[in-house]
Image: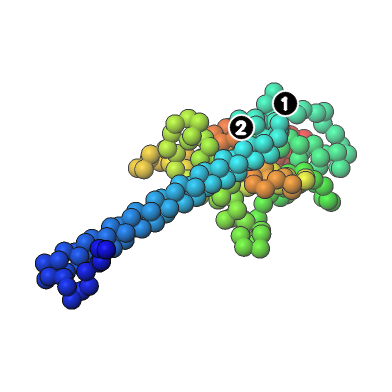
Amino acid sequence: MATNPSDGDMTDGEKSSEHATTESTEASSEDNGSIQKKRKIDADSVVLNEEEEEEEEEKKDEDEDSCESDQVWGFDSFDDTDFDTEQSDDDVEFEWNRYLYHVYKSRGFKVDSEIVPKGSFNGCRPFDLDKKFLHNLSGREYMDNMAKLALAKYNQHNQTNVMFDHVVRAVVKRCSGIKSYITFMAKESPQGDLIEYQAKTEWKAWQRNAHAILCRPALQMKPIPARYLPNPLPTDS
C-alpha cells in the first residue's frame, strides 16, 4: 500500500518545491480575492453611478413637470397688453391709475415705493435687497440667485456666455408664492461694459424650486403721461 512521505523522508529539493507550490497557491488565492474584491467595488460604483444618474433624471423631470403653463420659458405676460385711461380728479382713482401705468409701461420691472397704492394688496411692490428674506438668505442673496438662475437658462438657450455682475433692483408680486422682476447688470465679454439685463422668475408655494421665466437685455420703459410720474411736471395754468 502506498504511503505519503513524511517531512523526514523528503529531500531538501522536494521540500523547497512543495513550499514554492504552497506560496504560489496562496498568492494565486490572494490575487483572485483581490480581483474579485476589485470587481465588486467596480460593480458597486457602477450601481451607485446609475442610481445617482437616475436620481438626477428624476429630479430634472420633477422640476420640469412642476413648471406650470404661465412659467414657460420666454413667456412675458405683458406682451400685447397696455394700459391707458382717462384722466380722473378722484384721488383714489388717480393713485391706482398712476400705479398701473408704471406696472404696465415697465412690464413690472420699475415700480417705486412712492407710487404703490396705500393699503394691503397683492400687486407689484419694490423689494428691499438689504433685509433678511429667508432664514439663511438676505434679500440680495436671494435675488442674486434668481438672476443667475435665469441668466444660466438664457446662456443655454442662446449659446452665449453673459456674466452676472450685480442686482440693481427687484420688484416682487406675492400671490401663492413670489414672482420676481429683477434688473441686474452683466457683461457680455470679460472686458466688456456693464449692460442692464432683466430677469423674471417665480417660486410658487407648492413648488420645490423656483423657475426662470425670462431673461433679456433690458427693454426701454414706455412713456408715462407726465401727470402720473412720481414727481409730476408743473402744468400750464
Q: Is residue 155 left or right of residue 27?
A: right
Image quarter of residue 58: top right
Q: Is residue 1 visible?
A: yes
Q: Nearer the viewer, residue 76 or 87?
A: 76
Q: Position of residue 95 (x, y in %)?
A: 81, 42
Residue type at mark 1?
Thr
Q: Position of residue 223 (x, y in %)?
A: 65, 31
Read off the residue under disc 1.
Answer: 81
Q: Position of residue 236 (x, y in %)?
A: 74, 34
Q: Position of residue 187 (x, y in %)?
A: 43, 41
User: Compared to 184, does 80 lie above or below?
Assistant: above
In the picture as drawn, the residue positioned furthest to the right comes out as: 90
Read off the residue under disc 2.
Answer: 73
Tell me what residue is drawn at x 44 percent, y 31 percent.
159
| Precedes in sequence: disc 2 or disc 1 | 2
Q: Quadrant of the N terminus?
A: bottom left
Numbered disc 2: secondary structure: loop
In the picture as drawn, the residue positioned furthest to the bottom comes out as: 8
Q: Quadrant of the C terminus?
A: top right
Q: Is residue 109 left or right of residue 51?
A: right
Residue type at mark 2?
Trp
Q: Is residue 217 left or right of residue 93?
A: left
